Each structure stands twice: as C-alpha cells, then as structure tokens.
C-alpha cells in the first residue's frame, strides 16, 4: 500500500505524541473478532490496519475486500476529504466561504435570503439549517426534477450553524458547489485530488438530473480503498508520493478541525465534525463515518488503527442498533490483549 509505506512520516501524524498504548491486536483478539463478526449475518467484510499496514482481512459474503461496494452515506466522509483536498488545491478559499459564492448563477430564484449565511463549514457539519431531505423526505427529494433547487429552497428550521440536521441534500449542495467552483465534476475532483494521491480507484457513481454527482450517497469504493482514506486522516492529511516524498493532500490542521464536534447526532448522542462522527470506545477517542446497512470506517489514532466494515447495503435497514453492534466489534479490538 503505497500511501501507507512504513509511515516514514509518523512524526507528522496526529497520534505521534501519544502512542504508548498502541499495540497490535493479538491473534486471539483477531480470532474473537472473526467469531463475533460471523454472528452478524449482514456483515460482508472487515479489514484492520495497524501502524500503516493491513494486518487482517475477513470476507464473509458480498464484494471482496478489493472489490467495489456501495458505501451509502459513508460517502459523506469521503466527500469531506474531497472538499479538504479542494481547499488545499485552491479551488475553495476556506471552510468559511459562503455557499452562494461557489454556486454562482446556479442559485434558484425565490430562495430565502438567509442562504447567503450558509458556509462550506455548515455544509460539511450538516448545519445548513434547511429542512432535511433525509428520512421521510428522501423519496420526494430524489424524485424531484432538480435536487439542488429542491434542497436549497426548503424552509429554514434552524439558523445556519445551529443544530446538526443530518441531510443528504445538504451534502449534495456541497457536491454542487465543488462542481460549479471548479468547472470539473465531483467525480473528476475525487479521482484527481484524492484517488490519485492515494493510489485508489474512485469510479463514477449516481448523478442527479442536472448531472451533479450525488453528494453524500452511493459512492463505490473497496474496503481496502477506504483503509487508505482512513489512513490519510490518521496521518494528518499526508501521503508519500511515488518518489517517497511527503505530499500534503489535506490542508494543514484539516484533520484536527474535522474531528472537533460541531454538532451532535440526535440518535446516538455522538459528536459530528466535518463528515466524521466522534465518540469513545474502550476508553479511546474514535472517529468514524457510517452508511446505511452497516458501512463503517473507524480511525483510532492513539492505537494506530484503521478499521473498515462493509455490510449488505440493501433494504431492509437493520436499524440503529446494528451500528452499536459494529461498535462492539471495534471495542473488542481495542480491549487489552491477553498476555
């Protein structure tokens, strides 16, 4: 894995000052993980990386660990990385840039003037204040003739920067902003700014009626590719290029900012930053992205670990309790190893 090459730049990782507890899971711990995972019939695969190297892979069904799989709303975490890379590339000025500046002439007439207060940070943190398009509103939204206009003309139910209102429409506005600001598709940006540096493939995915790539849902990545995304964050946005030189993909300080809670999930109570949920498992700070059906990417900096879990993305939903079952698998990995 090129981007994980022996972590020669470990001193630049967020976890570099607090790794005294970082020990690799023992064979018995990994065996217990396999046993507990097999009891969750929905899970397709688990991949564990420690200190920059994949140390364990389990494939129980569905696409393999090197095969593309629909990561559902875990796409929001990847979209946040694309946004950070776009800021590093100068396409977006900063997270404080107003959304309307990026959308330009794509703004619909009759929108509430309050949309001028929405920033890139608000879109990343699900704090636009607009009525949600997820949940019971999702079907009507994706059936609309113009997803961007539908999302942006919904009534404000909170102030921009207020409560976290989990909404795929908010993420889609971010995809539209990236597209119009750059003159490239979100897919082109994803591959150029993220996929190429990480040496991973990000294929095209679903687009809206106007051709904007779906912001925050239905991206297709392999579990191994997701490990690379997690490791990019674990290493403070830096990878090694083909010559072994350090390449900054995400802006300096982006990871720290992304992992600061700006809102809170009304369902789990976990914090939410820029595309990442924030919690504690087994006494460790854990940052994770999640998607419908049991798609998950965990980064545990102090344990030098990145974990990917993929599951059946098709209905019916296993419910919120299933995420807690996935969290329990990670708790098992983080528990003290047997002597």
Image (tube, rainbow, N blue to C red):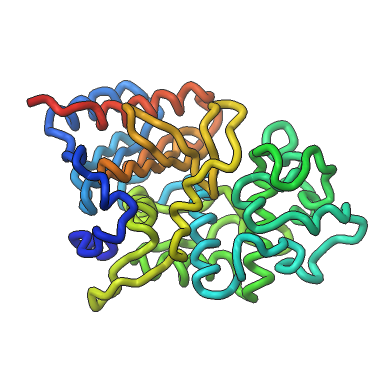
Query: Can you give x and y, in whole percent of width and height, for residue 164 in the image?
Result: 65, 38
Looking at the image, can residue 307 be seen? Answer: yes
Q: Position of residue 26 (x, y in %)?
A: 13, 33
- Taking the spot 84% from the left edge, 53% from the top edge, the residue there is 114
Q: Count of labels shown?
A: 0
Q: Is residue 72 visible?
A: no
- Left or right: where 321 falls relative to 238: right
Q: Report x, y in % for residue 156.
A: 82, 43
Residue lying furthest right in this view? 110
Where, quadrant-wise, is the N terminus in this rendering? bottom left
The residue sitting at 32% across, 27% down in the picture is 282
Relative to 181, does residue 69 appear above or below in the rendering? above
Residue 84: percent from left, percent from top = 51, 62
As rendered, which of 274 and 109 lies closer to the eye? 274
Q: Quadrant of residue 101?
A: bottom right
> Please, which residue is most extreme toward the bottom here?
243
Specify whether 48 is left or right of 170: left
Quarter of the image holding residue 173?
bottom right
**Residue drawn where x is 26% and y is 50% of the image:** 17
**Horizontal side of residue 183 vs 223, given as left or right:** right
Residues 317 and 275: in front is 275
Residue furthest to the left in view is: 339
Q: Residue at x 40, y 63 (%)?
A: 201
The quadrant the C terminus occupies is top left
């Amino acid at each position: 894995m090129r981007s994980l090459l022996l972590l020669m730049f470990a001193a630049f990782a967020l976890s570099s000052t607090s790794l005294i507890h970082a020990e690799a899971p023992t064979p018995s711990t990994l065996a217990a993980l396999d046993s507990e995972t097999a009891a969750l019939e929905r899970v397709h695969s688990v991949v564990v990386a420690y200190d920059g190297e994949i140390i364990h892979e389990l494939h129980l069904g569905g696409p393999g660990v090197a095969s593309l799989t629909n990561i559902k709303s875990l796409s929001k975490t990847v979209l946040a990385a694309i946004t950070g890379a776009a800021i590093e590339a100068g396409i977006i000025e900063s997270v404080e840039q107003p959304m309307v500046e990026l959308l330009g002439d794509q703004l619909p007439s009759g929108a509430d003037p309050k949309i001028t207060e929405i920033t890139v940070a608000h879109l990343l943190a699900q704090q636009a204040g607009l009525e949600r398009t997820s949940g019971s509103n999702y079907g009507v939204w994706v059936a609309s003739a113009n997803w961007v206009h539908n999302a942006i003309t919904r009534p404000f139910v909170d102030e921009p920067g207020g409560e976290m209102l989990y909404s795929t429409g908010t993420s889609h506005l971010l995809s539209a902003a990236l597209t119009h600001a750059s003159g490239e598709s979100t897919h082109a940006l994803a591959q150029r700014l993220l996929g190429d540096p990480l040496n991973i493939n990000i294929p095209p995915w679903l687009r809206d009626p106007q051709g904007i790539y779906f912001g925050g849902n239905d991206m297709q990545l392999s579990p191994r590719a997701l490990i690379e995304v997690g490791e990019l964050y674990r290493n403070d946005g830096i990878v090694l290029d083909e010559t072994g030189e350090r390449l900054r993909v995400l802006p300096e300080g982006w990871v720290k900012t992304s992992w600061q809670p700006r809102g809170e999930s009304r369902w789990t109570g976990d914090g939410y930053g820029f595309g990442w949920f924030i919690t504690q498992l087994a006494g460790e700070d854990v940052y994770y992205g999640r998607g419908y059906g049991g798609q998950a990417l965990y980064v545990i900096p102090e344990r030098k670990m990145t974990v990917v879990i993929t599951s059946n993305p098709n209905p019916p939903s296993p419910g919120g309790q299933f995420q807690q079952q996935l969290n329990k698998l990670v708790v098992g990995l983080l528990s003290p190893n047997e002597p």
